[in-house]
Image (spheres, coloured by chain):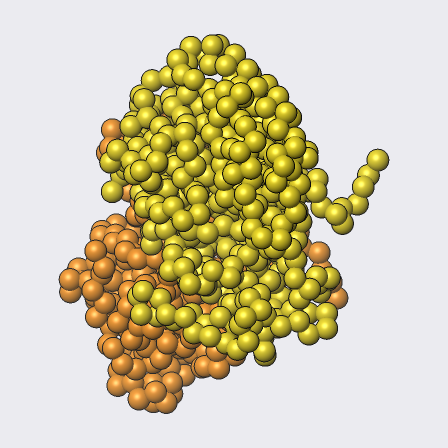
Chain colours: A yellow, B orange
Amino acid sequence: MVPHLITALTGPINELEQRILESMPAIERWFRLEWMEHTPPFYTSVDLRNAGFKLAPVDTDLFPEGFNHLTPQMLPLAVQAAMAAIEKICPEAKNLLLVPDNRCGNTFYLQHLQQMVQIFTQAGLNVRLGSLDPALEAPKRVALPDGSELEVEPLQRVRTRAGLKDFDPCTILLNNDLRGGVPRSLQNLHEQYLLPPLHAAWGVRRKSRHFESYEEVAKKFAKLLGMDPWLINPLHGRCGEVDADTAAGLDCVQAQADAVLAKVRRKFKEYGINEKPFVVVKADAGSRGAGVMTVRDARDIDATRLQRALARPEGVPGVTEVLIQEGVPTYERINEAVAEPVVCMIDRYVVGGYYRVHASRGSDESLNLPGSSYVPLAFAESHHLPHRGAKPGASAPNRFYMYGVIGRLAMLAAAYELEATDPDAEVYD
Amino acid sequence: MVPHLITALTGPINELEQRILESMPAIERWFRLEWMEHTPPFYTSVDLRNAGFKLAPVDTDLFPEGFNHLTPQMLPLAVQAAMAAIEKICPEAKNLLLVPDNRCGNTFYLQHLQQMVQIFTQAGLNVRLGSLDPALEAPKRVALPDGSELEVEPLQRVRTRAGLKDFDPCTILLNNDLRGGVPRSLQNLHEQYLLPPLHAAWGVRRKSRHFESYEEVAKKFAKLLGMDPWLINPLHGRCGEVDADTAAGLDCVQAQADAVLAKVRRKFKEYGINEKPFVVVKADAGSRGAGVMTVRDARDIDATRLQRALARPEGVPGVTEVLIQEGVPTYERINEAVAEPVVCMIDRYVVGGYYRVHASRGSDESLNLPGSSYVPLAFAESHHLPHRGAKPGASAPNRFYMYGVIGRLAMLAAAYELEATDPDAEVYD
């Protein structure tokens, strides 16, 4: 089934699509050259928003989920990409330890884990699941809807190495974003490959740092294509110290929101976009707090709304950093429901994607709130096979190719970001 | 459509399939380690024969054709593999020159070329076709059945580089096996990547040398799986000097045929295979002569039959080398027609496969004779996604995975072979 794309058939997004298609060999070469200098994250998923007049990433996940939504037709691509990834990192590897999130009660997440196990097994590894959950004391079998089972075992630290009972992995693949900090069992592992690296964990990573790198990438890419980087880049501002309890720092948030809104307004005028700009205000550390505040006027941000947006789990410090990001409405619809494309990547390769669809949310709201339900819809055709002759906006493979390009730009930005934030990096002056 | 596989559901081939599936992670790791030491050919196709009791490659083509038979579902894999291949060889490449065979009147071959152009364009290269045909003096547009056109241009040599008018490629990809020798325009190219290398051309390459390497690979692999290498290796003998005109050397061919038949007879006895062994006698240089002689008794080889099997184009010297190879019957059938699986690879990756099907030929005959027609049938499911729980012999993906493994063994053998025959290789004592 090809999703019915109802983004307008005219205007900048189709210009972008057309320019991207025309420049395909140049774009692919540009990525090749970038990957000579920069190491892609092991795996990534990127949430995109297609506003019709612009297309931008809004979230880059280095501990991706949702691989269960990839269609069976796309799985071979994932296996092949996993082979390439493993070969570069640890070609002699026999064993891979996958460290899941602790939410092993969630059926969707279990199906994602099952898919990951399948992909890496078929890439030639013995895969086992090692949990960080302190409540897990012995191996546990968890049932899946299809009748199969997954075994989750307690992760063990034995001197310098992490593993399981009778299982010593070469590579440890984190699918747990370590939002609560890095447990002792994963600290100071120098003999094994730990991927993604610990500084990619949400306890350390900052969205604003990622979007700073993304801006750099978007500018380079826009130069290659001779276009305005704003068409693929969401503007942003940042406040360094906001108190989630007292709302101290509110004035900074208001000023940054005002500044971003003013810039967006100018862009809207330049492109003749007849809409009211908005910004989203959220905690800069990824997993901190669930709130995302949508703001059309800086004066609407008051202490109460800010406190709610920065609400946080017990025990997390009150003072935090805040990201103020240009709101990119999503104008893709599937059966009248708001849809947000998600691009899935392993190593430097796009291996598929799906739509996060939410019938009861608006085009300016987050579709990824905890507890929100969504309908996954796999990209039906391959991002690898654009139809170069097709009319702009009319071809699903072309749309998916464009999404794959923007997804890879965000992944490249994550590579820049992780290099810049690497605490062990050697500094050259 | 899943081809209906009618190979027997019991006996050694299913044991092999089962053992290969059980050992999947170990096999993939073994390939990874081999690719650390050896460079895969740029692209390869391998003809297999599935005898029910054994499965073996019978031809390894380093200038493959038939990529037009890959299904649209498999194309993304080919694009991704091509990206990986290019990235290793010449990541900064903008331009790829594809050198076709001179048979540009053949519609199937033109469709193959069109597919190659599509694959490498989508991998991020500007692809143009440069012909060695001395009769081609100006660019020529050739029509394809789907209404599109391919442009073939005369290849030009300008001092140290080969290319086209206004087109200077980084990589030159040969799809012409140079059976007539290496033209001056391709000699001494030291600034560009010429792939496959010139010593892979059929003017130089010998089948017996390939199967010598294959035997080495098959033995290593069989050791890994704890099985008899004969189950995947066709035995062979060789005669160095046979005169195609006078049949001098007939006695050597008879003796070798006798020796191979005796060995096969012993193996048949060991496995309780109630069949009459046969050997095929053919020219050792790949493209030399079209004849393939099927022999069940060495005494049946007489001067007339030998001369016919070694028939050759005008101007080719009469004295030649001869390969005597264990005949592997093909017992796969599709709609009652004899079928031979062909595995297609780019770099180290299997990107798909198809069946060469011939209704009017027997199970002990070549299905790839010039002028013979055949019906291509793409592998319907992915070789990347074996079903590990399925009953041996009952699952098409498992069968395709096994074919992909044996295809890769032949490709690895080609890597060994090209290293051993490289005239520019440095010799370490």
Q: Position of residue A178 (x, y in %)?
A: 60, 55
Above-or-below relation of B315 to B280 = above
In the rendered image, the quadrant that contains the N terminus of chain B is bottom left
Which residue: 70% across, 61% down? A187
- In the rendered image, which quarter is residue B299 located in? bottom left
Q: Nearer the viewer, residue B136 or A49?
A: A49
Q: Nearer the viewer, residue B297 or A65?
A: A65
Which residue: 43% across, 42% down? A368
Q: Nearer the viewer, residue B323 or B389?
A: B389
Query: Is residue B59 left or right of A235 when viewed as pictured?
Result: left
Which residue: 51% across, 61% down? A102
Above-or-below relation of B376 to B417 = above
Query: Is residue B120 left or right of B333 when viewed as pictured?
Result: right
- The number of discs equals 0
Q: Position of residue A428 (x, y in %)?
A: 82, 39
Mark yes or no: residue B146 visible: yes
Q: Residue extending furthest right?
A: A429
In the rendered image, the quadrant that contains the C terminus of chain B is bottom right
Q: Position of residue B212 (x, y in %)?
A: 51, 69
Q: Nearer the viewer, residue A425 or A256?
A: A256
Which residue: 26% across, 71% down? B394
Above-or-below relation of A258 to B428 = above
Query: Is residue A344 left or right of B14 when viewed as pictured?
Result: right
Mark yes or no: residue B235 visible: no
Q: Position of residue A17 (x, y in %)?
A: 41, 25
